[in-house]
């Protein structure tokens, strides 16, 4: 899904120069830590840091970020509201009820919980965006192969498949149009819809399989795995800039956590809400 | 002194013979070679031939004769990757394809495939070129040099850093050729390299192939041969069952096997076809010309029969060009005469607000009974225009697209949602429009929506099945038909509806000679009965032979709309849109005494 909303933007920037695997691991670690934090302020602060990184280090205008995020904010708002409503007040010792209407009861903690979930998602989205807009897909796969020892078979296969995403998308649209011309009516009943989907799947699967086979043949006829090892045109390794980035980013995160803990803003774990 | 000279001469001749003997070295040897996927029905049957280094071979045969399978056998993909049963011997530079790994065979033989989209595994031009070199463990600096060198050979150096999906089909094919040149394999195989391309792409790719070094052995499968024919040394002719009919010099085959080739549905280029005709008329030549220039020379030299030749040429040319007055004149009894049934005004269209226009300022109208051809380079907006006509894409005001139902008396544009009731649209890829599980149900799908009378539906379905030669496949699943049959079915399922306006997107793509002729004759027949037909195609032979009006698009703008014959004489448009006129017409223009028709 992220691939459809976010796209790689080619720039000559620091963020673009950082090794994809380094970027990925840092982001994943940060995401895991944030998952255990139950206050809305921490994800907000890290979201701001993400935006600063994308705009300053990544040289991507803030407008472009909002353009990509905007369609998703509605989903975020939806998630926030459902989280507020679905928060189980019963587990609280002394709930401060703000609003009670029929079976819906909203306490101060449920609002904190909802906002936490909402901003956490927002923060995750921004870091995914940071990664996607600043990482050349080819570099990413190559660094998975070189640094993380992913099998080239899987790596190059994924790259070849990645090329087909937009192609299959167009194809789906064509099939949809073609069926419409044949007089296939849009049905609202779910069973009819599933039946229709089946009709779309056959030609799509066929074309995908055929393409996959052709690519496999093309790769093999270019001496894929002629030797157990291979060389690379792109020079992808961990450089000084990566080390500096790791140190600075970790230091920044530590500092923020330290300050947040000092002022008692950071809540660790779900239980902290009660 | 004399002695020294003699010695030198001897040395020269010795080195010459050495060179020749190197040239005569066989790179591909087949002996009683057969192949089948299931062990029963043979795809290739008992081929025996030797191909020598530097030879340029054309492989010809009707569709489904195993040409593509043969190319995959050459580098061992069959049987090592794709299962199949092989009999006899196939050796590539003395390596047996059964037991030598594909990765080793591939260092000697490279293939350019038909579909530009699905032969790459990387996203950028330079990465794609590097892929093969990386597999062979070349150093980074050498890879860089080789990339630049081979991109220069195909004139794509400025595109080194481009994303492949931003390049046109023709450029993609040139990238594919460059990636083989980088690997420097001795044998290059081309599997219909230009069949997906527009005339410009075709010309550029064929230019690149023409200029490949003489030391490379080339095997080419191709239908569109008018631009190519003269580069080949030999032809391998296969029949529909994958049997070798003959492997011989081009001229010999064109002389002796032409009628057989035609019967099998093999495309024969116009110029050799015409000279074959001359021979039938007892006009003989020493040399058999394969391109326009040679043909011209021969005609100019032959003063004795010149008049007769030109007469026959004129007759042949007129067969390739539709002679038909304006459509409206054919329907004098029709009340709709003089009124257009398709009217497009002020059409501007873009897919997204942020993007540029796909179509700009399009204005034209069509009368009932017109046979319109839409031409233009890939991505010039042809399909978009057609989809706008049937309201699949919605044009915004002030654009005005009016479609009139010809079978209605009152002069009122049809409502947008009614257009599909009297308009049929055949998609480029036949598979996209299949909605049912058997051929018969597929044909009757639309009929069942329109009519309730079972007998009527049956009669209509049976008739179209017979016309299209699909009556034996009634219970077959559409997806398991052959490519040509799929195309026939997709056309049949639209034609059976009896639509007044029929739009076809690349209907002749991938069809062999006979199927194309049959389909186009059927459309002509419908057109005579008053149906309006719009056809989108790259095939200029089809345009000139069957249409009476042409709309040429260039970068989304309409640069020509008018009679097909006018286009034939409009050199500027032909050149600026990179269209091509049939080679016989070109020849006639050059040797004939007066302007065409």
Image (spheres, grey):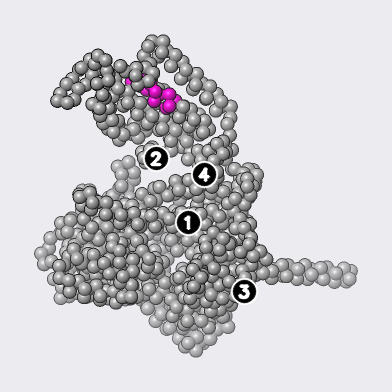
Distance (Cα) linking label 1 and label 4: 16 Å
**Label number found at residue A3:** 2
Tell me the quadrant of the picture where the N terminus of chain B can be found: bottom right
Q: Quadrant of the C terminus of chain B?
A: bottom left
Q: Which region of the structure is painted magenta?
A: A30-43
Q: On the rendered structure, is B406 left or right of B25?
A: left
- Residue drawn at (39%, 68%), measured in percent from left and top? B482
Is disc 2 in the same subunit as disc 4?
Answer: yes
Whether residue A169 can be seen here: yes
The tag earlier along the polypeptide, 2 or 4, is 2
Q: Nearer the viewer, residue B575 or B368?
A: B368
Is A31 magenta? The answer is: yes
- As helix, strand or loop, the secondary structure at mark 1 comes to helix
Chain containing the residue with disc 2: A
Residue at the (75%, 71%) spot, across then down: B17
Q: Nearer the viewer, mark 3 or mark 2?
A: 3
How crowded is the residue under tag 1: few (<14 C-alpha within 10 Å), some, or many (20+)? Answer: some
Q: Secondary structure at mark 2?
A: helix
Residue that numbered label 1 is attached to? A213
Label 4: which secondary element: helix
Q: Chain of mark 3?
A: B
Q: CA distance from mark 3 to mark 1?
A: 29 Å
């Amino acid at each position: 899904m992220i691939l459809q909303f976010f796209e790689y933007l080619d720039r000559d920037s620091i963020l673009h120069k950082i090794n994809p695997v380094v970027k990925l691991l840092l982001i994943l670690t940060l995401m895991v830590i944030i998952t255990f934090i139950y206050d809305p302020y921490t994800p907000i602060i890290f979201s701001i840091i993400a935006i600063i990184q994308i705009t300053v280090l990544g040289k991507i205008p803030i407008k472009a970020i909002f353009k990509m995020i905007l369609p998703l904010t509605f989903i975020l708002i939806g998630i926030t509201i459902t989280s507020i409503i679905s928060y189980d007040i019963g587990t609280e010792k002394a709930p401060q009820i703000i609003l009670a209407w029929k079976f819906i009861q909203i306490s101060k903690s449920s609002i904190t919980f909802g906002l936490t979930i909402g901003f956490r998602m927002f923060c995750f989205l921004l870091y995914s965006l940071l990664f996607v807009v600043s990482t050349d897909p080819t570099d990413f796969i190559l660094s998975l192969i070189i640094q993380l020892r992913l099998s080239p078979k899987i790596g190059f296969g994924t790259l070849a498949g990645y090329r087909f995403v937009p192609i299959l998308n167009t194809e789906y649209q064509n099939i949809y149009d073609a069926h419409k011309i044949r007089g296939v009516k849009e049905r609202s009943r779910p069973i009819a819809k599933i039946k229709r989907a089946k009709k779309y799947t056959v030609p799509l699967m066929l074309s995908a399989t055929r393409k996959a086979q052709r690519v496999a043949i093309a790769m093999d006829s270019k001496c894929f795995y002629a030797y157990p090892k291979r060389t690379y045109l792109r020079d992808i390794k961990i450089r000084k800039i990566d080390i500096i980035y790791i140190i600075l980013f970790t230091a920044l995160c530590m500092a923020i956590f330290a300050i947040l803990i000092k002022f008692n803003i950071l809540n660790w774990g779900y239980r902290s809400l009660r | 002194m004399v002695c020294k000279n003699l010695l030198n001469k001897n040395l020269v001749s010795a080195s010459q013979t050495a060179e020749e003997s190197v040239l005569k070295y066989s790179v591909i040897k087949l002996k009683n070679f057969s192949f089948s996927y299931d062990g029963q029905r043979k795809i290739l049957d008992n081929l025996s031939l030797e191909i020598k280094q530097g030879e340029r071979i054309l492989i010809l045969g009707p569709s489904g004769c195993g040409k593509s399978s043969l190319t995959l056998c050459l580098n061992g993909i069959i049987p090592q990757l794709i299962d199949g049963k092989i009999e006899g011997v196939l050796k590539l530079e003395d390596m047996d394809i059964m037991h030598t790994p594909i990765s080793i065979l591939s260092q000697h033989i490279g293939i350019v495939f038909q579909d530009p989209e699905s032969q790459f595994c990387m996203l950028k031009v330079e990465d794609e070129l590097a892929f093969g070199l990386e597999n062979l463990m070349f150093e980074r600096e050498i890879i860089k040099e080789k990339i630049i060198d081979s991109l220069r050979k195909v004139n794509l150096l400025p595109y080194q850093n481009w994303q492949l999906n931003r390049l046109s089909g023709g450029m993609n094919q040139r990238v594919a050729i460059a990636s083989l040149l980088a690997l420097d394999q001795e044998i290059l195989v081309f599997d219909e390299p230009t069949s997906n391309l527009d005339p410009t792409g075709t010309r550029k790719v064929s230019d690149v192939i023409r200029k490949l070094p003489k030391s490379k052995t080339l095997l080419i499968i191709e239908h569109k041969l008018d631009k190519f024919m003269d580069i080949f040394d030999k032809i391998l002719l296969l029949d529909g069952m994958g049997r070798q009919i003959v492997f011989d010099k081009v001229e010999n085959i064109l002389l002796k096997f032409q009628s057989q080739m035609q019967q099998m549905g093999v495309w024969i280029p116009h110029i050799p076809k015409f000279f074959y005709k001359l021979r039938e008329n007892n006009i003989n030549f020493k040399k058999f010309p394969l391109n326009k220039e040679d043909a011209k020379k021969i005609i100019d030299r032959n003063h004795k029969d010149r008049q007769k030749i030109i007469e026959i040429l004129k007759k042949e040319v007129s067969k390739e060009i539709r002679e038909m007055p304006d459509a409206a004149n054919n329907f004098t009894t029709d009340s709709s005469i003089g009124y257009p049934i398709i009217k497009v005004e002020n059409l501007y269209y873009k897919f997204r607000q942020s993007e540029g226009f796909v179509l700009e300022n399009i204005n034209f109208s069509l009368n009932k009974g017109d046979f319109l051809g839409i031409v233009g380079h890939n991505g010039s907006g042809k399909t978009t225009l057609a989809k706008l006509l049937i309201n699949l894409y919605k044009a915004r005001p002030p654009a005005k697209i009016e479609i009139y139902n010809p079978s209605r008396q009152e002069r009122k544009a049809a409502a947008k949602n009614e257009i599909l009731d009297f308009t049929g649209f055949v998609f480029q890829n036949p598979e996209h429009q299949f909605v049912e599980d058997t051929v018969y149900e597929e044909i009757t799908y639309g009929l069942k929506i329109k009519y309730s009378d079972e007998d009527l539906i049956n009669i209509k379905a049976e008739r179209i099945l017979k016309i299209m030669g699909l009556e034996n496949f009634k219970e077959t699943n559409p997806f398991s038909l052959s490519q040509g049959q799929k195309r026939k079915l997709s056309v049949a399922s639209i034609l059976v509806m009896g639509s007044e306006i029929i739009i076809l997107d690349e209907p002749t793509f991938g069809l062999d000679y006979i199927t194309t002729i049959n389909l186009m004759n059927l459309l002509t027949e419908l057109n005579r009965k008053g149906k309006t037909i719009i056809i989108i195609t790259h095939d200029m032979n089809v345009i000139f032979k069957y249409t009476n009006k042409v709309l040429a698009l260039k970068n989304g703008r309409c640069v020509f709309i008018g009679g097909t014959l006018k286009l034939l004489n409009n050199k500027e448009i032909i050149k600026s849109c990179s269209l091509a006129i049939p080679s016989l017409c070109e020849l006639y223009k050059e040797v004939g005494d007066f302007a065409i028709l």
